[in-house]
């Protein structure tokens, strides 16, 4: 939901910025300041450039809290300019009043969005751990995205996951393997989905295991395929469940996510995970074979 709001505000900024640059006279007339040539020739185009800057910051989805606050600052500037125009007798005060009301409403939306985003970011940082890793695969971004977009594929290369089941449009139920044969479960929802570019999800309210993640897909330099970058945040709870989750994610979560991405590369490029003698699964399998070979065999019948 938050991702859609940020993207929506970015689209609004892009549309308004283009309009202010392409048709500044019409925008000035619409706002009731048509008798102010400096406004239409200088001020309005500059405001358009500012709005395009907001759009460039919001649409990629990086640091949305910062860019929404810049919109709030811009709204304050707009209200100040409109207030000065209202005091000028040459202005069309009825149109200026309508424009001021519209900007005030937009300001309220921006302020609420900025406060909500800042609080959410603060909550996620409190007691959380952030892990980032990347891998390059010899597949097109569209193919890598399609594979990851089917969340039920994740247990194929993420060792700690037992299953991921889609429960609705964008919602899913996750089951992870924990030490001692136990399981940890939670529900999550996709909050942003851009084909061949980005998938972001987080746990729903009330989940014992709070986590969120983003996976980005970008064409690798030199036509080498796709760079897949994963950003994962998780906040283990306290008590026995917290200790279990800490063990679940391991003492070195960065190494774990790197191992997961290595297996993802193998699966999407070859269709399976290669088990070597040096990997835990490979060592386990080799030990079982040796034990079987050393076990006494039943005497052959004569």
Image (cartoon, rainbow, N blue to C red):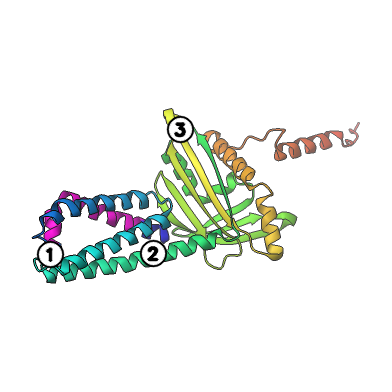
Task: Tell me if 110 is positioned left or right of 258 in this view.
Answer: left
Task: Tell me if 298 is positioned left or right of 176 in this view.
Answer: right
Q: Which mark is residue 32?
A: 1
Q: Which mark is residue 113?
A: 2
Q: Is residue 119 above or below residue 274?
A: below
Which of the marked residues, 2 or 1, is nearer the chain's N terminus?
1
Task: Tell me if 51 is positioned left or right of 58 in this view.
Answer: left
Q: Which residues are magenta?
A: 7-30
State the CA–CA distance, disc 2 to disc 1: 29 Å
State the CA–CA distance, disc 3 to disc 2: 37 Å
Q: Residue 186 in the image: state x and y as whole percent.
A: 58, 61
Image quadrant holding the C terminus, namely: top right
Q: Nearer the viewer, mark 2 or mark 1?
A: 1
Determine contact: label 3, label 2, CB under 8 Å.
Answer: no
Q: Which mark is residue 225?
A: 3
Label 1 neighbourhood size at 10 Å, few (<14), some (14-19), many (20+)?
Answer: many
**Residue at disc 1, secondary structure:** loop
Q: Is residue 12 magenta?
A: yes
Task: Write the residue at 44% across / 59% down.
Answer: 169
């Amino acid at each position: 939901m938050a991702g859609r709001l940020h993207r929506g505000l970015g689209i609004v900024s892009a549309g308004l910025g283009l309009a202010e640059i392409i048709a500044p006279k019409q925008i000035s007339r619409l706002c009731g300041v048509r008798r102010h040539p400096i406004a239409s020739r200088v001020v309005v185009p500059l405001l358009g450039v500012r709005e395009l800057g907001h759009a460039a910051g919001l649409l990629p989805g990086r640091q949305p809290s910062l860019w929404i606050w810049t919109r709030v600052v811009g709204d304050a500037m707009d209200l100040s300019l409109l207030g000065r125009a209202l005091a000028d007798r040459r202005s069309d005060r009825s149109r200026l009043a309508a424009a001021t009301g519209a900007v005030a409403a937009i300001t309220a939306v921006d302020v609420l969005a900025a406060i909500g985003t800042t609080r959410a970011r603060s909550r996620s940082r409190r007691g959380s751990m952030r892990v980032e890793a990347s891998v390059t695969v010899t597949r097109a971004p569209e193919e890598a995205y399609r594979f990851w977009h089917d969340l039920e594929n994740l247990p194929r290369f993420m060792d700690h996951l037992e299953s991921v089941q889609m429960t609705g449009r964008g919602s899913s139920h996750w089951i992870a393997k924990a030490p001692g044969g136990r399981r940890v479960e939670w529900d999550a929802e996709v909050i942003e989905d851009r084909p061949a570019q980005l998938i972001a999800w987080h746990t729903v309210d009330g989940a014992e295991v709070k986590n969120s993640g983003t996976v980005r897909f970008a064409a690798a330099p030199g036509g080498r395929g796709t760079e897949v970058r994963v950003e994962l945040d998780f906040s283990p709870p306290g008590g026995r469940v917290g200790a279990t989750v800490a063990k679940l994610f391991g003492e070195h979560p960065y190494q774990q996510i790197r191992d997961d991405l290595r297996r993802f590369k193998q699966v999407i490029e070859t269709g399976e995970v290669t088990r070597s003698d040096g990997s835990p699964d490979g060592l386990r399998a080799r030990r079982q074979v040796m034990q079987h070979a050393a076990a006494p065999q039943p005497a052959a019948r004569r």
